[in-house]
Image (spheres, rainbow, N blue to C red):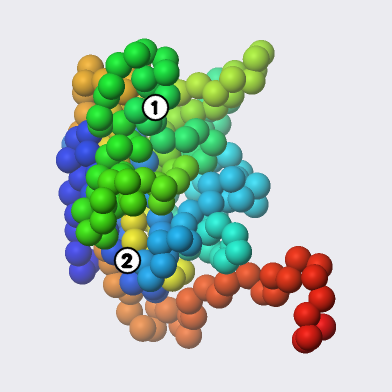
Amino acid sequence: MVDEVTVPPRDARTFNVPAGHIFRIVSVEGSQVGDLNLWNADDITEKFFSGKTRQLHATHLTTGDRLWSNLPNLRPLATITHDTLAWYGWDEDGAGVHDVIGTRCDPYTNHLLTGDDYHHCCHSNLTRALAEAQGISLQEAEPHIHDVMNVFMCTGFTRDTHQYFMKASPVRPDDYIEYFAEINLLGALSTCPGGDCGASHSDDAAQCFPLKVEIWKPSKEALNNWQPAKSSGYRGNHGVSTAND
């Protein structure tokens, strides 16, 4: 292990993962959900594309699935290499863990639904963390915040109306999910104000806990001539002829 970052309750922190390294998101004290954003550390306009990841893999991710970047790059940012909650599968309600269907909680939707201003929604937490890490304003950082991987979150769709629902996460201390960085990554993780997301949300009512991010460096032998992921091979002319056609 070469670095670790502790994310306090109802807050977010950034972390850097060099290509070819591993990062783990670890439950350390209690049942807590985390909202994950990922960017190309060298160009944050390239970021995690939850919709395409869902299309290529599933609504809920586990070992072997990859987190893909937005167009036009469309390449794997990270590959999930271990998941201690893989045993959960699908429960009697049709719920699973680690979804890429729900967006991060945000103050705009919360104000729309409740009329209240709450500043520790995951969207706000991630915005503050990115602004601090990049040395930019909140207004500059906010457009780079994107739909998340809901780490440890237990969700599904109701069988009758097919509406999104959340239930208490099964995550316990020492559970973790592990990723292999396919390029140089900048990550940000928010400890959701909903705690285990089984009850209250977007307020200070739920019990919340920290999460830890560990960065690991594998041996050269373990990488076995691995190379960073390359951008999509599509030329990008979109049907318009060029001199090279």
Left or right position of 5 against 62: left
**Which residue shows up at 31% across the image and 31% down it?**
121
Left or right position of 201 against 164: left
* Residue 116 image point, x, y percent: 30, 16
Report the quarter where the C terminus lies: bottom right
Q: Quadrant of residue 190?
A: top left
| 1 or 2: tag closer to the N-terminus | 2
- Counting every numbered tag in the picture gives 2
Q: Quadrant of residue 200?
A: top left
* Residue 55 image point, x, y percent: 65, 47
- Amino acid carrying label 2: it is Val
Density class for disc 2 (Cα within 10 Å; few <14, some 14-19, many ≥20) is: many
Left or right position of 156 against 146: right
Query: What residue is disc 2 on?
Result: 17
For discs 1 and 2, the disc positioned in front in the rendered view: 1
Query: What residue is disc 1 on?
Result: 108
Q: Name the element at disc 2.
A: strand
